[in-house]
Amino acid sequence: MAQEREILDEFKQVTDNYWLTHSEYTRVNALLLYWTEDDLGVAAEVTRLQRVFEKDFAFQSTVYQIPSKNCTTELNFQLASFIRQHASEQGSLIIVYYAGHADEPDQKNPGSSGWRANLKEGPALDWHLMQPALYGANGDVLVILDCCHAALKTRGSKKGKMELLAACGSGSRVPSPGKLSFTSILLGQLKQKVRNGEAINIKSLHCLLWADRLPTTGLSFHPFFSCPDIPWLTRDCDPETPVYFDLSEQETRSIVLQRLQSATPNGFARRHSPATSFMLLKVSLNDDPTGLQIADWLKSFPPKTIQDVDIEALVLKARRLENIQEYNCFFPGSVLGRLPPASQEQILGGIWGLSHTISSTAALAEESSKGLNSGSADEATRANFAEKVIGDLQEKVQDVSDNIEDAVLLGANFTLQEALNDEAVLVAEAEDSIRLTQTIRQYLIDNSYIPNTANLPSGAVTEELTQRAASSHRLRYGSIWDKKVVVERFQYATNAPESLQPTEKALLQVKRMVDQLILPRKQDFRALPCVGFVYERHIKTFGIVFELPPGCDQSKPPMTLLSAYSTRKRVALDVRIQLAFSLATALGHFHRVGWVHKEFTSENVSFFVGRDQSESDLTRPWLFGFECSRPGDAESEMNADYSPSGNLYRHPERWGNPTIKFTKAHDVYSLGIVCLELALWKSAKGLRELKEKPLNPWKLKEDLITLVRKDIPHMVGQSMADTISTCLNFKEITKGLSEFETHQEFKLRILGPLKNARV
């Protein structure tokens, strides 16, 4: 024990300020561009950015001054050479940065994007003809543009990650170099984050840049738009606002900037020490014959819906999780070693189950390599078998990851920042949930905390109403700087009927909500990535702006679950159970990070139609209605509501004028009502139990439980019936239990039966 403690202390002492974080990239190279004829004076800011990249991030960088003569040919050659030299392999990231002038958009060719050396005349080139070269990079690509009219529509088909962060959108202008320039504000955020040991998610960085550049006075323009250096940059021009685009071909997680890991510092490698969790991420398939054999075997007849790279990633994660036990990551002093015994046993039990699945799969792969199980099975049969094996592996990997995340978020006696520095936790991919939990807890610690949230300017979102979407529809399609979005609108409170301004409390509530929604999170939350929010005073509404689901057909409006009950007359039982499981999983994820929804109803569950679909996929729900959501331990709103329809999904304690604070158990009760609707496939508003006069909420609850016990097993099976009963009685079932124990009951009594009931 003493020796292990000594080793840990030595590791911390030697590596302090050395590994701030772990990067997913093995190499990062930046190409910093500006003109030789630099009439703006950007050279000083470019040098500062180069210094931060090299000193603080340990990136490699190249500064290239675009020549006046043959500028297009020379930059094309430089760009091609840079890509060939630094972006030829996966696991790499290249950053292309430009500071200088840009042409105003051409009305006849809105996709064009030109750079120029001087404001009005001089050398110029067409960037939109050069950017497609970046789509051929094997690694990831980040483009940063500090120029006017920056984010023009120059999309392509990059198979890996490619993102654009720009000072402004098309038709907007930016300040000249100085303390208020885009690059200066970007540098401030980069230095603050990396020196605090924080990872920098590009999408989240965009939101922070928004906040830094937004006015605090409520004006629609920023006071720094009066720039004597550039006559046309006045308060009369369009306000510049940083913009972000994901140019990847497929939906991916946002690029994350972190300090690169260097060679092991002198002083630590000189001693032999027991393996610890910091070794886990060093495991790769190339160094793992068993994992490599499994991956190669599964890739030899993969299902059409699963790519080779996904199979490799799954096997690699499975082997890393399995190695948590082998590397003895539960040693005293480690993050996992400081968990309660019950949490450790749960994690180890999951790892043993995963290890058994891996061993069985490895045996099948070994037999296949010797030709012992090839038989006469056709390709389709083998693909189906592979899909089942992959499904089993995914399930076991998910179980172990969830167990680690449960323990860290709900049952730990250490800080979340400590957990972020533990590689066993990172292997479980729990970092996004940890950061979200940190944000939520910030509100509980400091009630006066005002987040840096993306308050989008009025008019930034252009709405697109289809003929089939009524003007009053709560969800509207739209676009913001050529990016297609969906906007959820709701009215805000004002201090007086004639006032158009939201109350300070209403504005703070929506800022905090959006601050949580913009953070990266797993898809199992079933909440679309958030871009920001707008508030339009003339109609007294907030609008939460979300990215669209991949492949969404905007010619067909979204459909709520409530409307589906009347428009989709018959829905298969397995689809309804899968939908119930997806919704329960989503609610469990929100509760695990300390977030309650408060309006979990069938009207706040929506579905989108894919471009290759004739109707919505009911197994892929998306949650909305976050206007009332908040941290689980925060003060509740005690608003009165006496309408039966308004109270239908609410626990009896929350009917009328509630005096009881909203809790997670109240959300679970709402889930039970939604699951009851799924079993009956009709809105609960039509239940005869709801038509009694006068309506007693506690009697209604008992009547619904009686209905579930009497009729639901015959209709959808005992598992679904038990789940609904548990949801309706969850407050009583979990009385006196800890957060961790309550969540385990949720998994055991609600998620478990639904998972097993799926066909």
Image (cartoon, rainbow, N blue to C red):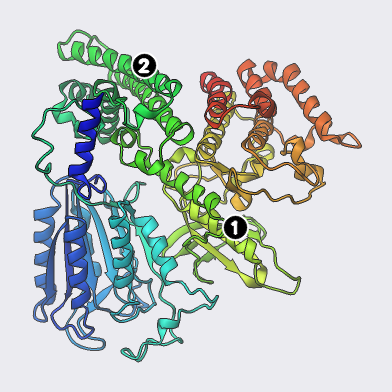
Whole-angstrom CA distance, mark 2 to mark 1, is 43 Å
| Relative vertical location of residue 378 with respect to residue 527 in this rendering, above or below | above
The answer to whether residue 299 is visible is no
Label 1 Cα neighbours within 10 Å, binned few <14 / some 14-19 / many ≥20:
some
Residue 626 screen position, x and y as percent: 59, 50
Q: Residue furthest right?
A: 693
414 or 146, which lies in front?
Answer: 414
Q: Which residue is mark 2?
A: 353
| Relative vertical location of residue 51 with respect to residue 576 in this rendering, above or below | below
| Left or right placement of residue 132 versus residue 499 in this view | left
Q: Which residue is mark 1?
A: 509
Q: Quadrant of the N terminus?
A: top left
Residue 50 screen position, x and y as percent: 18, 66
Looking at the rendered structure, the kind of residue marked 1 is: Gln
The answer to whether residue 287 is visible is yes
Contact (Cβ within 8 Å) of mark 2 with mark 1: no
Q: Residue furthest front?
A: 2
Q: Nearer the viewer, mark 2 or mark 1?
A: 1
- Give the quadrant of residue 604: top right
Looking at the rendered structure, the kind of residue marked 2 is: Gly
Label 2: element kind: helix
| Left or right placement of residue 320 versus residue 756 in this view | left
| Left or right placement of residue 256 versus residue 686 in this view | left
